[in-house]
Image: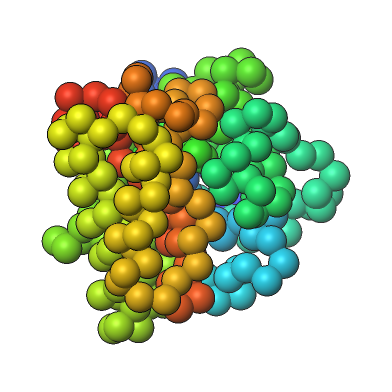
Amino acid sequence: MFVTRDIESCRRAIRQAQADGRRVGVVPTMGALHEGHLSLIRTCHESCEYSAVTIFVNPTQFGPGEDLAKYPERFEADADLCTSRGVNLLFAPTVETMYPGGERTTIHVSGLTDGLCGPHRPRHFDGVATVVAKLFHILPADAAFFGEKDYQQLAVIRAMVQDLNIPTEIVGCPIVREADGLAMSSRNAHLSPETRKQATSLSRALFRAVDEIDAGEHDARAIAAFIRSEIEQAGDCEIDYIEVVDATTLEVLSIVDRPARICLAVRIGGVRLIDNVAVGTSSRLGCGS
Ligand code: AMP
């Protein structure tokens, strides 16, 4: 595996692989790799002959008071995982390499960023869209793999790529969960044994809501209220939002009458967790791309 922190050598390696006739896939991450990230790498291998992973904890997508300073960092272990999974290129730039001009130029995707996490994390999606666009210029890959765990992020990136005519195919990958249902996340490491247990209330409530919908409940407000009560019963927490949205436009729905997502963000013990589930399709397992 070729490991580099340098933009030019990274771009050269990608172009060489493409010149050799290999389809190139990239998996952008912030490191502290877990099974969720590894599933993206596996999906990348399925359609690409050359796989690149990026590890960059992007400061511009963290707001003041967010967890940038304590974001877990495990570069050596991450590099070993990438090697063992057959990754060809690992790009891990420094902040100075990525932002020599500071935040002079940014990308804002409007509309899709107005709701859900948008109001709770001002400028977060500008940071995400900008760094992903930069990565696509540094690694001009044929395809890029993102998790549905960050459902709004995936929608924002799809829109950005379409609007800016970036010729990289965006592939959404299903959420990978722990055995007890908790969506895998680098942030789960910050949970105490008690809050880790409490955190299972999120996916449990979402899955019960799917059952309610399957049983005939289509009123989005009633569904959100049901989820709220399930989560609040599990213990102290701060609910940022629970919303039922159109699966493509992220428009807030009052009736589940089309493919939709129930998305939520909840703080438990100071750790902000997000999760979502597909509804308005035939089954809860219909959460693939
Ligand atoms: P992060 O390192 O948290 O920025 O995540 C990098 C990529 O991995 C993003 O596309 C995430 O959506 C994806 N990802 C993170 N957790 C999961 C998960 N549990 N299942 C699937 N994809 C995930």
Residue for point 61% across, 75% down: 69
Q: Residue 224: x and y, percent?
A: 39, 46
Residue for point 26% across, 44% down: 209
**Up-down relation of residue 131 to residue 80 (above or below):** above
Nearer the observer, 209 or 58: 209
Q: Residue 1: x and y, percent?
A: 35, 51
**Up-down relation of residue 285 to residue 229 (above or below):** above
Left or right: 26 as drawn, with respect to 175? right
Q: Residue 253: x and y, percent?
A: 46, 29
Name the quadrant containing residue 162: top right
Left or right: 157 as drawn, with respect to 134? left
Residue for point 73% across, 59% down: 96
Quadrant location of the C terminus in the rendered image: top left
Nearer the observer, 259 or 179: 259
Left or right: 197 as drawn, with respect to 3? left
Name the quadrant containing residue 246: top left
Tell me if I can see residue 265 in this picture: yes
Nearer the observer, 231 or 153: 231
Tell me if I can see residue 145 in this picture: no
Nearer the observer, 16 or 234: 234
Residue for point 30% across, 60% down: 230
Residue with the most extreme bottom position = 193
Display coloring = rainbow
Left or right: 271 as drawn, with respect to 231? right
Q: Residue 142: x and y, percent?
A: 43, 24
How many numbered marks appear?
0
